[in-house]
Image (cartoon, grey):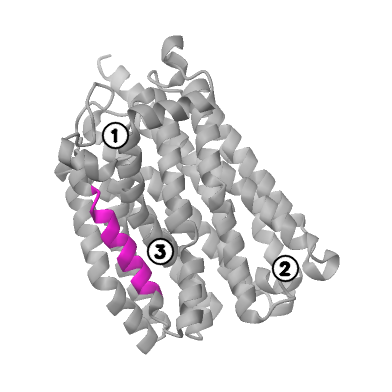
Amino acid sequence: MSMRPHSFEESNRRRTILATTIGNALEYYDFTVYGFLTLVIGKLFFSAFDPASQVLLTIATFGVGFVMRPLGGIVIGAYADRAGRRKAMVLTIFLMALGCAMIAISPTYAQVGIAAPIVIVIARSLQGFSAGGEFGASTALLVERTAPAERGFMASWQFASQGLGVLIAALIVAGLSFALPATAMESYGWRIPFILGLVIAPIGAYLRQHVEEPSMAAGIVSASERQPTIRGGLADLWRDHRRAVIVAIVITMGGTGASYVIGFYMPTYASRELGMSSVAALFGACVTGGLTFVLSPLIGRWSDRIGRKPLIAGGRMALILLIYPAFAWLKASPTPLTLFTIVSLLTAVLAVQAVPSIVILPELFPKRVRASGMSLVYSIGVAVFGGFAPFVSAWLVQTSGDKLAPTWYLISVALLSLFALPYLKDRTGDDIDLSGDAVSSSSSKAKVIA
């Protein structure tokens, strides 16, 4: 009899992980599969431009989705804090599916002219709006369903699910690229991944509708604690948690820049700049997604034992030291074996610092603004330093002629992000719903941050 409450809670926790991971993976699949079809979409929707400009414009359109993420973070994050995490998560998955459907049925530039890329931009904006609200709601649900001693493990499934989404997207695009001739891929094959994303979205929505809302979620928060409007929630974040918002954005930028260059730009870089086959490049992305999924929970456990800050600092210093030699090695030896080895090494280093960076975000904000606070800072960090990282990388290569130029961007953002760590308290193992400021409030440091 005494084991029943424990078993029931463990069962609920597993259902939460399953619903969040599968739903989030589907969201990231829908959002990222576009990035793996850059070369094909560039030919079909920006055919009026030269090949180099096609790549830049397609990558820029990929980045447009990130411009809308802060707005989605504000609106859907506030909704999650007021109506509950579950309702917000169901909403985001249907919005993402709608954007996926628009891309799947969109006519090409040859068929309708300038209207074609406009439809793509609108669809990507809708997907970005959805993704902006997804992060805060799903991460809050994970951390609010566990004991403080296991918070890193639970929150790590957020990053793991991103890796799973990348793995599925890369596998499907690689499989289609291998199975279909180039003419078939450009004719109809590129639409198949988006159709699949649309079809499987209801599965994620069903799982999320049946997950149990944690007792500390918005539905239990008293009326006096709730923000009456989105504007009120923003005012509260800026008035009472300004320093936490700024520190969190700076910390986030170091991980997101590396994540989107390694996970999304690398396939384009390997095939376009180094002449590797697109299938080999996509299997490199599969390695990234698979390793992220496997390593994230392990690193989450590790962060529960030794703290978040040591892993963030160590992982980013390792990235700074390794990124240039890794790109130089790949340039000197552009073979599938070299690509897979480098991607594996960089993904492991990325996960070491990215997982605790995500875990630390819900530890910065109280529950009444947790989803909106996390969504806002993560969306801004991803939008500015992550989503446009592939575009910046491609632009640097094109303008400088240096195929190693992307490394300087990654080194710069990683170095800058380290400056925020001294201003952050490591709350590993603490009850984050008890009073306490997660950001150092000494006067000298406050002046630097504010």
Disc 2 from disc 3: Cα separation: 28 Å
Residue 15 visible: no
Asked whether the residues under the numbered discs 1 and 3 touch, taking CB atoms below 8 Å apart as contact, a structural biologist would say no
Residue 54 got which mark? none
Q: Which residue is mark 3?
A: 288
State the SS at label 3.
helix
Q: Which residue is mark 2?
A: 45
In depth, the one of 224 and 317 nearer the eye is 224
* Range drawn in magenta: 406-420
Q: Earlier in the sequence, mark 1 or mark 2?
A: 2
Quadrant (top left, top right, bottom left, bottom right) of the N terminus: top left
- Check the image and report above or below for 54 versus 385: below
Q: Which residue is mark 1?
A: 363
Q: Quadrant of residue 361?
A: top left
Is 213 included in the stretch rendered in magenta? Answer: no
State the SS at label 2.
helix
In depth, the one of 179 and 28 nearer the eye is 28
In this view, the mark in front (1 or 3): 1
Three-letter code for the amino acid on which mark 3 is drawn: Thr
- Check the image and report above or below for 212 versus 398: above
Q: Position of residue 407 (x, y in %)?
A: 35, 73
- Disc 3 crowd rating (10 Å Cα; few below 14, some 14-19, many 20+) is many
